[in-house]
């Protein structure tokens, strides 16, 4: 596979959203470049527009660009608001078109909103960690949901 640029990466973000012991998963549309028709969690890419037109936090930097982009992606993909996201893990892969991607996976509690899917998804369901086994998820998503489920259980104990 030819890699387009070995120093540049697309930065993507995912949100494992928890509500009442269940997790939101959505089915990707068949025209997606990566993982068409697979089930996943909400997320998307960091864009320069997520911060460029906002005031800098310091003289040279913008703080919270990732969190702001993740909140925007969740709103765009499923019309929900989330509580403060917490970092879970990072993943790297090469897209079929040769673009290197770094995914930053977060988890957050549902805050508000009614689900309204964007054109990038065709279905959604709230599932338990155990029920993820019944869906054709992108590799690793079920394991990530299980990790979050264990964290949520230990928080309650």
Image (cartoon, rainbow, N blue to C red):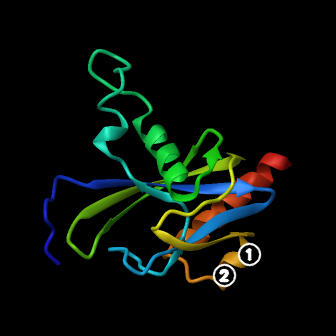
Q: Is residue 57 left or right of residue 151?
A: left
Q: Quadrant of the N terminus?
A: bottom left
Residue 139, position as x, y percentages in the image: 49, 76
Q: Is residue 98 visible?
A: yes
- Residue 27: name its quadrant: bottom right
Identify which residue, 24 or 152, lies in the foreground: 24
Q: Is residue 63 left or right of residue 52?
A: right
Query: Mark 1 to mark 2: distance in Å?
Result: 6 Å
Please give the residue where the numbered disc 1 appears in the rendered image: 130
Q: Residue at x 55, y 78 (%)?
A: 137
Residue 132, position as x, y percentages in the image: 66, 76
| Secondary structure found at label 2 | helix
- Residue 94: name its quadrant: bottom left
View extreme (right): residue = 157
Q: Is residue 15 left or right of residue 101?
A: right
* Residues under numbered marks 1 and 2 in contact, where contact means CB atoms less than 8 Å apart: yes
Q: Residue at x 37, y 74 (%)?
A: 32
Please give the residue where the numbered disc 2 appears in the rendered image: 133
Q: Residues within 10 Å of mark 2 (few under 14, many from 20)?
A: few
């Amino acid at each position: 596979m030819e890699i387009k640029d070995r120093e540049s990466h697309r930065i993507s973000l995912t949100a494992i959203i928890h509500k009442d012991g269940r997790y939101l998963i959505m089915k990707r549309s068949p025209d997606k470049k990566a993982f068409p028709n697979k089930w996943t969690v909400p997320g998307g890419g960091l864009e320069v527009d997520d911060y460029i037109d906002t005031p800098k936090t310091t003289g040279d930097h913008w703080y919270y660009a990732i969190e702001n982009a993740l909140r925007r992606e969740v709103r765009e993909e499923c019309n929900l608001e989330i509580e403060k996201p917490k970092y879970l893990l990072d993943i790297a892969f090469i897209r079929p078109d040769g673009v290197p991607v770094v995914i930053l996976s977060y988890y957050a509690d549902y805050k508000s909103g009614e689900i309204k899917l964007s054109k990038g998804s065709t279905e959604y369901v709230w599932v338990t960690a155990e029920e993820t086994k019944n869906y054709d998820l992108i590799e690793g998503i079920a394991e990530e949901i299980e990790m979050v489920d264990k964290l949520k259980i230990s928080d309650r104990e």
